[in-house]
Amino acid sequence: MKPLSKQAAGHNPDDYPRFAVTVDIAVFTVAEGALRVLLIQRGEEPHLGAWALPGGFVHEDEDLDSAAIRELHEETSIKQAPGHLEQFGAYGDPDRDPRQRVVTVGYWAVVTDPPEPVGGGDAAYAEFVAVSEVESGRIVLAFDHKQIFDDVVERVRKQLETTGLGRKFLEPEFTISELRQVYNAAWDANLDAGNFQRKVSLTDGFLVPANKKKPKVSDRGGRPASLWTSGPAEMLDPPITRPPKD
Amino acid sequence: MKPLSKQAAGHNPDDYPRFAVTVDIAVFTVAEGALRVLLIQRGEEPHLGAWALPGGFVHEDEDLDSAAIRELHEETSIKQAPGHLEQFGAYGDPDRDPRQRVVTVGYWAVVTDPPEPVGGGDAAYAEFVAVSEVESGRIVLAFDHKQIFDDVVERVRKQLETTGLGRKFLEPEFTISELRQVYNAAWDANLDAGNFQRKVSLTDGFLVPANKKKPKVSDRGGRPASLWTSGPAEMLDPPITRPPKD
DNA sequence: CCAAAAGTGTTTCCTTTACACCCATGC
DNA sequence: GCATGGGTGTAAAGGAAACACTTTTGG
C-alpha cells in the first residue's frame, strides 16, 4: 500500500499508477426562454439509457482544453468555436466508473443557436434539456454527473453577475432586451427592463453600438430596439445582482 | 492520430492512453501580518533548486481529496486536519513536465499556526513564503506554478469576501480584531475596525461568543477583546467587500 | 491621568429599486 | 388611436464608509 519513496519515484516515474483521463463537458445555451444543457442518453453500459453529460478520453498529445473542444464538436456537430470554454473541476473518486480508474476534468461551454445535436459514439441520443428538468429531479443523471451538474450550473449563474458571459449566448449583434432575456432564463427571474438597460450601459466598453441602420423590430409591435455588439470589457462593474430567490 | 471509435473504446478501455496524475497543493497561513503560502525548493531535476508548490502522485486506490491531504501531511509534518481544503483546477498541458505526460489537480488548504515545515521527498527545503514575494517577482516558480499560484491566490482573496473562510486562519477561539488582521494581511488592506465589527456581527450564526471569563488582553494595553468561536454560518451575507486597490 | 485598543453611534454618500412616464413602431 | 415593447427620469429605501465617541484595560 505504501508507495515507493518519492526519491525513487522521481527517477522511476513508471513505478507510479496511471489513470485514464476524460473530459466531461456541459454545453449551455438559451432556447425557448430556458437555460439548457446538452445531455446524452447513453448507448452502452454502464448506465445504458441513462442521461449523462457528454465526454470522452483525452488523447496522448492533447492538452485538456483541446480535448474539450474536440469532444464538443464530436458530440454536437457544432462547427462554430464555442463562445466560452472554461474548466470547472476534476473528479476522481476511485469508484466513480466501475470499469476502471478514471479522472474526469469538467468543462463548460456556451454556444449560440446550436444545430440539432446528433447521437454519436457512446451516445444513443442527445438533446438540449432545460436545466430545470434536472434540478427538479425529473431527469436523473448517471455516474456522479448530478454533482458535476450542480457545481457547474451554479458557476454559470454566478458568472453572469460579474462578467460579460451573457453576451456569449447571443448572436454577434443583439438587443439589450435579448440580453435581459438570457438573464431571466438563466436565473428564472424577471428583471426590471429599465434598470437592466441602465446597468449594462454603466460599464464602459461592455456594449458598443452596431449598425444603426437596422433596428430590430419586434414581432408583436413596440418600439424597435437598437442593436449592440460585444465590447472589450469582460467584467461588469458594477455587477448585475441576482435577485434573491423567492 | 485519430483514435479508435468510441464504441470500441467502451469495450477496450486499455486502448486509451494513461496519464500520471499528481496533486499540487497551496497551503496558506497568516503569519507576521502577511498571507503566506508553503513553497518548496526542489531537490531534484528538473528545476533543481527552483521554488515550487509541493505536490505528489495520486495513488491507485485513493481519491483526489485524500491524496491532497496525504501530501499536505507529508510535506509539512502538520498533524492537524487542514481547516479548509478545496480543489481549484486541473492543469494538463502535454509539455508541462518534460519527463512524462502529467495531469495535475490543484488544491489549496488553510492551516493555523503550522510547525516549521521540513524538506522531504523531492523538497530540499520548505518555507512559508509571503505571497507578496511571489507576486512581486522576487521569487520565481518552476513549471507552470506561477499560473497556478495566481489562480489560487485570487480565489482565496475572493472567498474571504463572501464566506467564513477567514476563521480558518485562526485558533478555535479568536477575537474580532484577529479576524480583521487576517483580512488586512490577505488583502493588504486596512479595514475600519468599527465597520468590520459591525459587519461580522450582521450575519447570524457566523460568530458565537466563547467563554466570557477569559477576555483577551492585548500586550500593548487597550480594552480586552471578547473571544468568539466559529458558528454554523458558512456564508457572509452581506459580504465583506474588498476595498479597491490603490 | 494618559495611551491604546475594543466596541457603538451617527451622519453622509452612494447604489439599488420601484415605477412613472415618454418614445417609436405595427396594426 | 391603441397596443406593445424600448428606453429615460426620479424619488424613496437601503447599505456602505468615514469618523466621532464611549468603554475598559495597563501603566
Image (tube, coloured by chain):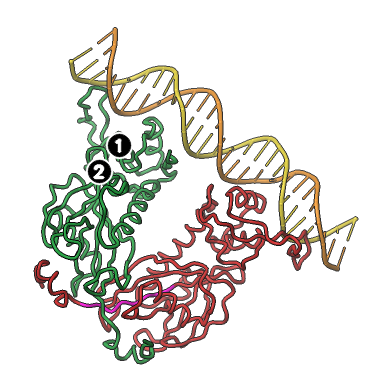
Chain colours: A red, B green, C orange, D yellow
Residue density around tag 1, few if under 14, some if 14–19, many if 20 or more, within 10 Å: many
Tell me the amino acid under the disc marked 1.
Gln
Instruction: Indicate which disc residue B181 carries.
Output: 1
The residue nearer to you, when weighing A35 against B90, is B90
- Residue B45, how many percent across, how many down? 16, 65
Q: Chain of mark 1?
A: B
Q: Do residues under tags 1 and 2 come within 8 Å of each other at their CB atoms? A: yes
Q: Residue at x 60, y 52 (%)?
A: A200
Highlighted magenta segment, given as a residue range: A18-25
Image quadrant containing the N terminus of chain A: bottom left
- Residue B22, how many percent across, how many down? 23, 68
Position of B221 relative to A18 (above/below): above
Residue density around tag 2, few if under 14, some if 14–19, many if 20 or more, within 10 Å: many
Q: Quadrant of residue B34?
A: top left
Position of A206 relative to C5 (above/below): below
Instruction: Indicate which disc residue A61 carries.
Output: none
Q: Secondary structure at mark 2?
A: strand
- Residue D2, how many percent across, how many down? 86, 58
Principal secondary structure, stretch drawn in magenta: strand
Q: Quadrant of residue A8?
A: bottom left
* Relative to C14, B87 lies left or right: left
Q: In the rendered structure, does residue B235 fall within the stretch colored magenta? A: no
**Mark 1 to mark 2 CA distance (whole Å):** 9 Å
Residue B79 seen from this side: no
Label whose residue precedes the other's in the sequence (1 or 2): 2
Tell me the amino acid under the disc marked 2.
Val
Q: Secondary structure at mark 1?
A: helix
Q: Residue at x 43, y 45 (%)?
A: B237
Residue B64 seen from this side: yes
| Residue identifier under label 2 | B30
